[in-house]
Amino acid sequence: MGEGSRVKKVVSSVVVGVLTGLFYYFVYVILLPTLFSKIFPDAEVLETPILWLLAFALFTGIGIANSLLREHPISLPLRLLSKVLGALIVLTLLNFGVVRGEVFMEGSVIEYSMDISLPLYAVILFSMLMFP
């Protein structure tokens, strides 16, 4: 195998890793929290730029490592790590499935708390099983 073909293989693996990291970032940090905030408008979505940047860096780094080590047995734990990390980020962004809010009715304030963790876990499990 020539030097040029090895460089092309490494570069293509890095590009695939970056694209995989971007895909996981989009699904777990952007798509799932947005979906749940549309379904449950009063859900608290913790939007901190540091968390978003950290998630982007971790997903991209794990994606690059996974694509570079594709033939190595450690690629499976790296893929699982990125999925578990995505689930943890979604749960953190959505306050672990607890929706709290206030409703104003006839001059009084009614506070409510709703646990949506079961549908949240179902969606996260579905996303973990469906995405490679």
Image (tube, grey):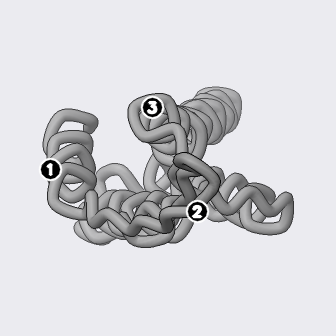
- 118 with respect to 51 (left or right): left
Residue 122 horizontal/vertical position (percent): 15, 50
Q: Which dot, 2 or 1, sits closer to the camera?
A: 2
Mark 2 residue crowding within 10 angstroms, few (<14) / some (14–19) / many (20+): few
Distance, label 2 to label 1, CA atoms, is 32 Å
| Residues at circles 2 and 3 in contact by the CB criterion of under 8 Å | no
- 98 with respect to 37 (left or right): left
Toward the right, the furthest residue is 49
Q: Which residue is located at x 54 percent, y 59 percent? A: 101
Mark 1 residue crowding within 10 angstroms, few (<14) / some (14–19) / many (20+): few
The dot on residue 109 is: 2
For mark 3, give the secondary structure: helix
Q: Which residue is mark 1?
A: 122
Quarter of the image for residue 45 reads: bottom right
Q: Sequence-wise, which precedes: disc 2 or disc 1?
A: 2
Residue 1 visible in the displayed image: no
Q: Is 79 above or below relative to 78? A: above
Q: Which residue is mark 3?
A: 35
Looking at numbered disc 2 in the image, what kind of residue is underneath it? Val
Toward the front, the furthest residue is 106
Q: The C terminus is located in which quarter?
A: top left
